[in-house]
Image: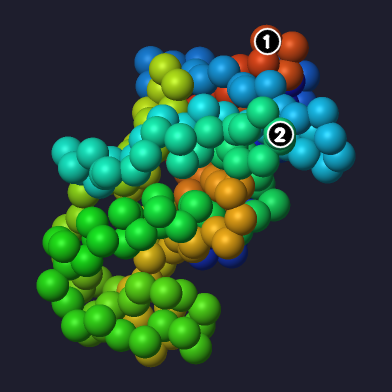
Amino acid sequence: MFSYCLTSFFDTNSTSPLLLGPLAKFSGTTIKSTPFVKNPSRVPMNTYYYLSLQGISLGTNNLAIPPAAFALQSNGTGGFIIDSGTTFTILVNEAYLAVKSAIKSIVKLPIADGSTIGFDLCYFVRSSSSPPSMPNLIFHFDSADMVLPVDNYMVFGNQNLWCLALFSSDISLSILGNFQQQNFHILYDVDKEVLSFAPANCATI
């Protein structure tokens, strides 16, 4: 087993711990666990950690995403993986569009062009202290909900831009990136084939 805890994305003064073997374990009442999905046998897909993502909510709004959107197919395509080496979460297009539409329905700020910094949906804000209050974005995994605060799915860019930190995938694979994993302690129990996670102040671990 191993675990890590990624500090806040823009925290340049702290280090993110990587813990191996018995040191990887952690405890608490907020821990959630979800089983790994058996990965395909073909290279390189057999090296990835697949999860069963069953839906996404923005606050109490359960988004209209087809159940098969994140399913791993019998031919080894599709599915949803967790990856510490991918920066921003990538969702299949129909799921991304559902999240994007939900964000647009509640944010009434002026929409801005974020293409110069690589983002699809951005808003203009006067300062980093002025964005609106936002609900949590919730990833509903098998037996576990990962509840992402706004700082884990919206990001401040240059020129007072506030952007959705998710991307659309042009393939059938979706990926949970490290921006969304910030300030979560995440444990990979390979023997038991389970991923566990809990919110944490990673700078203090």
33 horizontally vs 25: left or right: left
**Residue at the farthest top position:** 192
**Place of residue 201 in the rendered image (x, y in percent of width and height, measured from the top left):** 46, 40
Residue beneath label 1, please? 192
Callout 1 secondary element: loop
Q: Which residue is mark 2?
A: 75
Q: Is residue 197 left or right of residue 152?
A: right
Q: Farthest residue toward the right?
A: 43
Residue depicted at x 58% and y 62%:
170
The N terminus - image quarter: top right
Q: Quadrant of the C terminus?
A: top right
Q: Residue 3, percent across and down?
A: 66, 30
Q: Quadrant of residue 12?
A: bottom right
- Classify mark 1: residues with Cα within 10 Å, few (<14), some (14-19) or many (20+): few
Which three-letter amino acid code belongs to the residue tagged 1? Answer: Lys
- Whether residue 4 is situated above or below residue 87 in the rendered picture: above
Asked whether residue 94 appears in the rendered view, the answer is: yes
Mark 2 is surrounded, within 10 Å at the Cα level, by few (under 14), some (14 to 19) or many (20 or more) other residues, namely: few
Q: Residue at x 28, y 78 (%)?
A: 123
Quadrant of the rendered structure where residue 31 is? Answer: top left
Name the residue type under label 2: Asn
Mark positioned earlier in the residue sequence (1 or 2): 2
